Each structure stands twice: as C-alpha cells, then as structure tokens.
Image (tube, coloured by chain):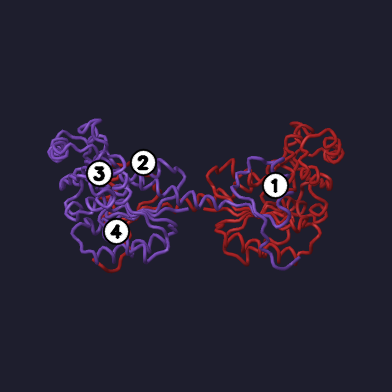
Chain colours: A red, B purple
Amino acid sequence: MAVGVFDSGIGGMTVVREIRKRFPGEKIIYFGDTKRVPYGNKSKEELIRLSEQIVAFLIAQGAKVIIDACNTTSALALPHLREKFTTPIIGVLEPGAEHAVHESTGKIGVIATKATIDSHCYTSKIMEKDKDTDVTAVACPKLVGFIEDGDLDSDYLKRILKSYLNEIFLNNCDTLIMGCTHYPFLADTINQLVGEEIKLIDPAIPTVDILEGYLEESQSEEICYVSGDLHEFNNTLMKVFPNHGFEKIVEFDPIVDGE
Amino acid sequence: MAVGVFDSGIGGMTVVREIRKRFPGEKIIYFGDTKRVPYGNKSKEELIRLSEQIVAFLIAQGAKVIIDACNTTSALALPHLREKFTTPIIGVLEPGAEHAVHESTGKIGVIATKATIDSHCYTSKIMEKDKDTDVTAVACPKLVGFIEDGDLDSDYLKRILKSYLNEIFLNNCDTLIMGCTHYPFLADTINQLVGEEIKLIDPAIPTVDILEGYLEESQSEEICYVSGDLHEFNNTLMKVFPNHGFEKIVEFDPIVDGE
C-alpha cells in the first residue's frame, strides 16, 4: 500500500526517514511544494486550496493513506481535508503535541518557524490535551536555512541554536518538541546541546505510530478464499504448508454461474 | 501491490510459497475453487466462464497482477482472460515449458494429472519452443490425493511415485516438469527418487520470475515530486538525507491555482 507524504519543501523527508526505518518495504510517494515554500505566510484559504490539490494528486498516484508532514497545513487545513477526502490523512501536529504531553511532567518547550509559533497551534493543541501545561514556544527563524544549506553541525549553527534554546533552559522545560519537520535533521546536534535532562520530541515518530495502524489494517486484508469446505481445506493446508502466512482463510464463492 | 493467485484448489499454494520466499513483504490474495475442483473434466467454455469471474473478483479485492496457478486454465482460458482484462495475468504453463526447454538437452519428462496430460498442453508448448524435443508425458492420477491427505513422503507414496517415474527413467529424460501445482509439495521426495541426473522443474519458480518484472515496474513508481527547482532540492536532499530511497525525483506541479 502506497503512503503519500507532502510538505512545503524538504522537511517532510524526516517523516519519510522514519517510515523507511520502521517499514522498509513500504512504498512512498512524496510531494514537496518547493515552488511555494514557505507556507507560513499564506492564508488559511490559500493553504486549503493548495493542500486539496496536493492530496487529490497523491491519491491519483495511488496513495492509500496520506501524511500531511507540514505543521502549518496540519494546523490550518487538515480538518477541511478530512471532510473532503475519504482517504485517511494523518497530520504531524496532533501526534507531536500528544506525545509531548505524555512524556512531560508539565513544562514543554516548542521550537518552530516564526509562522508556526505565531499561529500558537502547538500551544493550543498542548493545552487541549492538558490545560495546566506550561508551554515555552520559541521561534527559530534561521534554522531552516542552515538545513537547506546542508549545515547540520557547524560551530556557527551551534551558537545560533544555543541562543534559541536559552529560553527553553531558563523555563526548565523537560520536553522539547521539534515543531518543524526540518528540525529532526538537527536532532543529534540539539541533543548534544540540551543533554539528557530534556527529552527531544520528533513528531514524525508518533505520526508514524498512527500510520502503523493503517498499514496493519491493510495487511489484515491478506485473505485466502475457498469456494468449498473450509475445514477440509484448512486441514490439508496445515499439513502441506503450515507457514502459508494468510491472516484469514474464509469460505466464499464469488462465482454465480458456470457450475 | 497485491498479487492475486488462483487455482482449482490448494495446489496454487506452491506458487504462494515461492512468492513468500522471494518477496516476503508482498501482499497476496488467494482464491482456491475447492467447490469445483478438479477442473480437468470441465469444458473450455465452462473454464473461461469460471476463471473470468475469479479474475474479476481478485481485481475487485485489489489485485494488481494475477497468477493463474492452474495448469488447466493456463492452457485453455488464459488467452481469453488476457483479452478481457487489462490487469496482467501470468500463467504457469508457458514459464514452466520455457524453463524446461532451456534446461534440457532435448529429453523432457512431464508428470501431471490425467486431464493435463490428455490435453497435451505441455507437449505442445514445449514443441512450440523447440520442435525437436522428445517429450515423455506421464499421467499420475493418484498423486493429488496423497498431497490432499498430507502424505508427502510415506513408503507407499514412494512406491506409487516410482512406478509413475519408470517411463521417465526409461526414456532417459534429463529434465522433469512437475506439471501440476500440487506436485512441488512432493519435490523433496521426487528429488530423492530421480537423483541428480534429472533436473526437476517447478513452474512456480519461472512464473514468479515473471512476477518480479511486474513488481519492479510498480516499485519504480516510487517517486518524489517537487514543484520548484529540482537541482536545488536534490542538492539539499543529498546533504541531509542521502539514503532517501526514491528511485526518481521529478519536477512537477500538480497545483493549478492558489498561488
């Protein structure tokens, strides 16, 4: 079953990376809207119109489940997309927020692009899950540029990162959401800076947990049909080919004539 | 991509076994027409009507490529099915015959059900490939019963098998086609009896070779689309995620408005 993944640019590749790691055989169709990146300065109506067309395209290419890897469209367009399409669409925002609330004792940091921070989407999702959580949201406008340039660990990048993380340290956050799909490419560097005290949350991971449910469901469709006696067939099958691998063997006759 | 496999009964499971071995992640939908087994005593018209409905059912269940694992329908219904459906349908007869001609120096044995032997389908397929081949075709009416009972290696079975193989030995065959999809369950026992002198052909193996072509073709659809500059995207991708696994990265914009 093909999984469609889209993002405004290259960031959603961190979700692809996670899918590759967890489901090595899974077919992925990716769309990166690099022509219109960034999405942060677009209106909700524009984002809905764009993402509707992207989702329709991915479905036409054979995607049976879609991951909206973009934080901005996950926040603003997803409810509309879910109404419009029957194909399941998974966003990154909700799984990321939920996972952070689960891991934290009540002080969550969020780093993201300026647009995502200004939208308060993570803060409100977190408050929905646990209204007592103290959220420290820091816009990191320069990080995407470093990643796009392929700089994942220079000293200069680390200095910039440290200044962004300062408020996270000051507010004693125990959990930090990487609220932009680009950021997990910096996970090693960020982990070095925040140490073991702060748990880093890559929303791609709980998102791909949800994907697992859909893939399992589709795999459970692996069926062996027999038109005659089920018990007899099962008996023979277990003798000659016990490792047949079918999850279901059912008696069903699709033939209406020709007997 | 789901593979549909059908046979008159359990025999096609030897094809399933080969698919599982070669493509462990591949989804299979199986239909065994155990209600109407055996197919050997049915008319060509009946077989066409039956197999049309089976193929339509497997396509409706999501099969993107179909293996007709039944020797009888592969011989009698396949040309018609290929005209009727656009979904690719692979038979076992032609790959089996072709593989045997390739392996043999000119003396091929065929063991199969009485119906298959009487139809001369293997003999004529082999003669099509190489008209000088000497074909020894032996009907083995009792073998399917042993397999259906789960008896794959009793002394009694071996005695019966030896008597069937006698003509194969007498005619100095160097290659032996198991011309019934049940028989590969007996491959170990048959190999013991014929020794290394005679090469045993399981048509499932060259059949699944052909399947590989279709699966590869479908896997090559694993595409990453970007709406903006391809070169720029590729540059960044190779820096941050060189093992992305996409076979093609193409510049394509599916969005017609909303810019």
**Above/below status of B29 relative to B20:** below
- Mark 4 on the same chain as mark 3: no
Q: Amino acid at mark 4?
A: Ser
Q: Badge 4 is on which residue?
A: A227
Q: Give the x, y percent position of residue A183.
A: 74, 43
* Residue at image point 61% right, 50% down: B248
Task: Name the N-terminal-most of marks 1 and 3.
Answer: 3
Q: Amino acid at mark 1?
A: Asn
Q: Amino acid at mark 2?
A: Asn
Q: Mark 3 falls within which chain?
A: B
Q: Residues within 10 Å of mark 4 (few under 14, many from 20)?
A: many
Q: Is residue A202 visible?
A: yes
Q: What's the CA distance linking mark 4 and mark 3?
A: 25 Å
Q: Mark 2 falls within which chain?
A: A
- Do residues under tags 1 and 3 come within 8 Å of each other at their CB atoms? no
Q: Give the x, y percent position of residue A192.
A: 76, 31
Q: Give the x, y percent position of residue A56.
A: 61, 64
Q: Badge 3 is on which residue?
A: B178
The label nearer to you, 4 versus 3, is 3
Q: What's the CA distance linking mark 1 and mark 3?
A: 51 Å
**Above/below status of B122 relative to B166:** below
The label nearer to you, 2 versus 3, is 3
Q: What's the CA distance linking mark 4 and mark 2?
A: 21 Å
The label nearer to you, 4 versus 1, is 1
Q: Badge 1 is on which residue?
A: B234
* Residue at image point 38% right, 51% down: A248
Q: Amino acid at mark 3?
A: Met
Q: Is residue A152 left or right of residue A91?
A: right
Comparing A222 with A104, the one in front is A222
Image disc number at residue A243: 2
Q: Is residue A139 left or right of residue B173?
A: right
